[in-house]
Amino acid sequence: MNNSIDRTFVRKVRKDQKKNDFLFWQTQTPQARLEVLESIREEFNNWKYGNQQRFQRVYKIIKRA
């Protein structure tokens, strides 16, 4: 998933004119909310751990009779 955030638009508003973010997200579809959440998660992981995501442990699956 390659969703980059467009950071080219900036709007300055006074605190008393600030809109409610909750109302904005309520108008979005569940799919759109999940896509944004995934992009935020991906951006955080890249910041915290770099581009390399790995498992912490290696597990071996065995079949028991």
Image (spheres, rainbow, N blue to C red):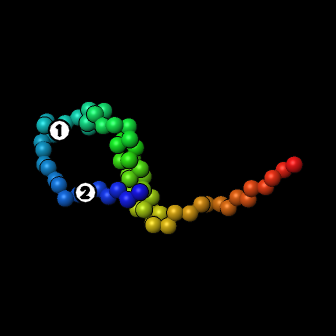
Tag in front: 2 or 1: 2
Q: Which of the 4 image quarters holds residue 28? A: top left
Quadrant for residue 56, please give it: bottom right
The picture quadrant where one finds residue 16 is top left
Tell me where residue 33 appears, x and y as whole percent.
Answer: 36, 41
User: x%, y% of residue 63?
Assistant: 81, 52
**Dot 1 crowding, Cα within 10 Å, few <14, some 14–19, many 20+:** few
Q: Does residue 62 appear to the left or right of 22 in the view shown?
A: right
Q: Quadrant of the N terminus?
A: bottom left
Q: Nearer the viewer, residue 56 or 28?
A: 28
Left/right of residue 21 with respect to residue 34 in the rendered view: left
Secondary structure of the residue carrying numbered label 2: loop
Question: Is residue 44 among the parts visible in the rendering?
Answer: no
Secondary element at tag 1 = loop
User: Label 1, on which residue?
Assistant: 18
Q: Position of residue 34 (x, y in %)?
A: 40, 43
Q: Nearer the viewer, residue 47 or 5?
A: 5
Type of amino acid at the residue the image marks with label 1: Lys
In front here: 1 or 36?
1
How far apart, in angstroms, are the residues tagged by discs 2 and 1?
20 Å
| Residue located at (26% from left, 36% from top) | 24
Spot occupied by residue 7 in the image (x, y as percentages of width and height): 23, 57
Around disc 2, counting alpha carbons within 10 Å, would you say few (fewer than 14), some (14 to 19), or many (20 or more)? Answer: few
What is the three-letter code of the residue carrying label 2? Asp
Label whose residue precedes the other's in the sequence (2 or 1):
2
- The image shows a total of numbered marks equal to 2
Give the labeled residue for mark 2. 6
